[in-house]
Amino acid sequence: MIKATKLSKSFLNRTIFKDLDFMVKEGEIKAIVGPSGKGKTTLLNVLSGLQKVEKGTIEINGKILVKDGQYVKLKEQREILRDVSVVFQNFNLFLNLNVLKNLEIVNKDSEKIDRLLKRFGLYDKKNLGLGGLSGGEKQRLSIIRALIKNPKIIFFDEPTSALDVLNVKYVLNLILELKEEGYTIVVVTHDLKFVELLNCEVFSI
Amino acid sequence: MKKIFAFVLSFLLLFYFLIGCSARGKDEIKTRKNFVVGLDVNVMPMGFLNEKGDLDGVDIELARAVFLNNPYFQSHYIGIIFQPINWDAKEMELNSGNIDCIWNGMSYTNERDEQMKLSRSYIKNSQILVVSRDSNIKELKEAKGKTICTQKGSTGFDAIKNSNIFSEKEIENVVQLENMVDCLNEVLVGHSFGAVLDEVVFKYFVNKKGLEGKFKVLKEPLSKEDYVIAFRKDDVKLKEEVEKGLLNLIKTKKAEEISKKWFGENIIDLKEVEGKQKNSVKQNDFGFSFELFKGLLVSLKLFFLCILLSIPLGLLICFLRVKEIKILNILIDSYTLLMRGTPLLLQILLNYAAYFVEIFRGGYKSIDRGQFDAIKVLDIPKNRAIFRIILPQMFNVCLPSLCNETITLVKDTALIFSIGVVELLTVSKNMVNNMVSIKPYLWAALLYLLVCFLIYCLFKFFEKKLKY
C-alpha cells in the first residue's frame, strides 16, 4: 500500500507537481497516465525513494517515509524502501555484468534465481553478456532483477515503450500474474490501450 | 603576383646564402690556426722543462719533426705550439678545441680509446725489473721473496701488484722511494735485490748519466704499455696525417736519430696497440652497456612508485570530488589546478595524481545515471556496487586515457635526473659523453619504447577484459 498526500516537487525553480495526492491499495494495480513532461516518472522516482519531495507525506505499507517534507532517518528509509522495486523504462541493467551476475549482485539466492530464469525463459542465456539479449529479453531480465529483491510493491516505468506487440502481450499477462500473486503494482505509461487492457484504476496527472 | 614575389625572394635568399658561404670560406683561410699540441710539462723524458726552462723531450722533437716533414701541416697551420694543460681535464681541452692533440707519453687505455681518437703505438714501454749486473737471475719469478723497490705511487708499483708473482705480504714490504736515483742506489749498494722501473725513463736516465753496463734488465717485463697520441674523436684526418708524418720519420731514420739521442738506442716504431681490437669492438660498435639496464631499473622503480601511489590517490580524490560537496570541490579543484599548472618536476607523484583525478572523473561522469538509480532501488551494498559496477564501468571508459598518461609517466621519470637520481636517460647521457657516440641514446630510446610497448599491451589486455 502506498499513500501519498500533498506532495510538492520542483526542479531548478520549475514546479513539477504541487499538492498531489496518490494512493494505491495493497494487491492492486494502479496506472499513472498523462502527457510527457508532466512528471509521471518524477512521481515514480519520489515514491520509490530515488528523489525527494519538498513537501508532503508518503506512507508505504503503513510506515512513514516522509512526513510534511521531513524524511525519516536514512537507515529507516532503507528499511521501508526494501519493499519497493522498480522496472526501469530503459531497464538500467548493469552493463558490465552478464545475465546471472546482474541478478547475483542483488541477491545470492541461487535457487530463486534459477526458478525465475526458467519461468521467464532466460535460463539458457544466463551466462551471456547483455549484448546477447533482445529488447524483450532485457526487459524480462530487468523484471526478474526487480523480483529477486523480494519486494511487495513493483513500479513499472513505461513497460511497453520499447516492445513489439508480442512482447507487450507478454508483459501484460505477466503484470496480471504478479497481481494474482499478491504484488502491489504501479504502472507509469502513456499507452492508453495498454491501460485499458490492464483493467485497473487510473491516476491522471 | 604573389608567386613572382616569392620567386624573387627565394632567389635573393639563395644569393645571400651563397655569398655568405664564400665569405666564410675566405675567413677560414685568413684565420688559419696554429697546430696546438697539449702536454703535461712534467713527463721526463717525453715532454718537460729543461734546466734552461725550455720545453724539451722526445715528444717535443717528434712533434716538431712531424710538423716540418709533412706538407699537410704547412698548408693547414701557421705553426706548431706546445700548450701545457691540466692533465685531469685533457679530454675537455681536446673537445673544446683548445688543443688539437695530446702528445705526452700517454699510455693507451680502453677508457681513453672510448673517449678520444688514438693513434697507433709509437713507443712500446714496459715496467721492467732492474737488478745489479752481478746478479745471475734469469726469470722474473726468481725475484719472489726478494726485496724489491720502486718509485712511490708509480705505475711500477701497480705492475708489482698485478704481476701475480708476489704475495700480498711481499707487496706490502715493497720499498717505495721518492725517485729513480734512490731506487738505483738501493740496488747498487745491495739493500734491494732489484727495482721495478719504467723502461723508457730508465733508458733515458742510463743514457744521460752514462750508466751503461752497471745494471742488468730482465727481458720479461712486469707489464707493458703503449704510448699513443690522442685526437678528437672525429678528427680522423689529423690522426692519419700525424701517423703519416711519423712513418716518414721512421723511414728516413730521423726517428732513430731522435731516439738514439735520448735513449741510446732506437725504440720508436709505429705499431698497432696490443689487445686493442677486442675491446674497441665490444664498446664502440654497439654503444651498448649493461649500465643501461641499471638505469632502466631505477627508471622502472620510479615509475612503479609513482603509478602505484598516484592512481589510487587520483581515484580517491575523484570519488570525493563527485560527491559534489561545495567546500571539498573548491579544495580539490584548486589542487588539480595547482598541480596540473605547475612544473611536473616539482611534484611528479602529486602531479600525476591530479591528472588521474580528472581522468577518473570523466570516467565516473560517463556512467549512466540509471546505473546509480538501479543500485539505489535494488539496495545493493555500497562496496559491492563500487567494485563490481562503478569501477569496472569507469575503467572501461578511462583505460585509453590512463594508458596515455602512464606512458607519459614512463618518459617523465627522466625528469628526475635533475635531483641527482641516475636513471636510464642519465646513464645513457653519460655513456654518450664517454663514447662520443649517440648510440647509447638509441639504446635508451629502444628500452623506453620497449617499456611503453609492454604497458600498452597490458592496457590492451585490461581493455579486452573489461569490455562489455
Image (cartoon, coloured by chain):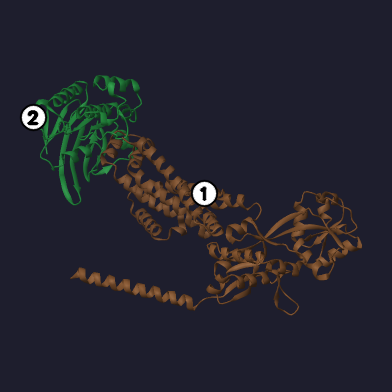
Chain colours: A green, B brown
Give the quarter of the figure containing the N terminus of chain B. Answer: bottom left
Pick whichever, B20 or A141, lies toward us: B20
Question: Crowding near pointer 1: few (<14 within 10 Å), some, many (20+)?
Answer: many
Query: Is disc 2 in contact with disc 1, using a CB cutoff of under 8 Å?
Result: no
Above-or-below relation of B173 to B102? above
Pick whichever, A102 or B184, lies toward us: B184
Pick whichever, B306 or B258, lies toward us: B258
For label 1, the SS is helix
Task: Tell which subunit mark 1 falls on.
Answer: B
Residue B33, quarter of picture: bottom right
Residue B116, quarter of picture: bottom right
Q: Amino acid at mark 2?
A: Lys
Q: Amino acid at mark 1?
A: Leu
Is residue B322 at all visible to an observer of this figure?
Answer: no
Task: Tell which subunit mark 2 falls on.
Answer: A
Rounded to the nearest angstrom, the CA distance separating label 2 from label 1 is 71 Å
Above-or-below relation of B71 to B370? below
**Total count of labels:** 2
Question: Crowding near pointer 2: few (<14 within 10 Å), some, many (20+)?
Answer: few
Report x, y in % for residue B263.
76, 66
Report x, y in % for residue A186.
18, 31
Q: Is residue B276 left or right of residue B454?
A: right
Report x, y in % for residue B421.
54, 56
Above-or-below relation of B19 to B243? below
Give the quarter of the figure containing the C terminus of chain B. Answer: top left
Q: Residue furthest bottom?
A: B52
Q: Label 1: which residue? A: B296
Point 32% across, 48% down: residue:
B362
Pick whichever, B359 or B107, lies toward us: B107
Q: Nearer the viewer, mark 2 or mark 1?
A: 1
Q: Label 2: which residue? A: A193
Point 35% across, 24% down: residue:
A109
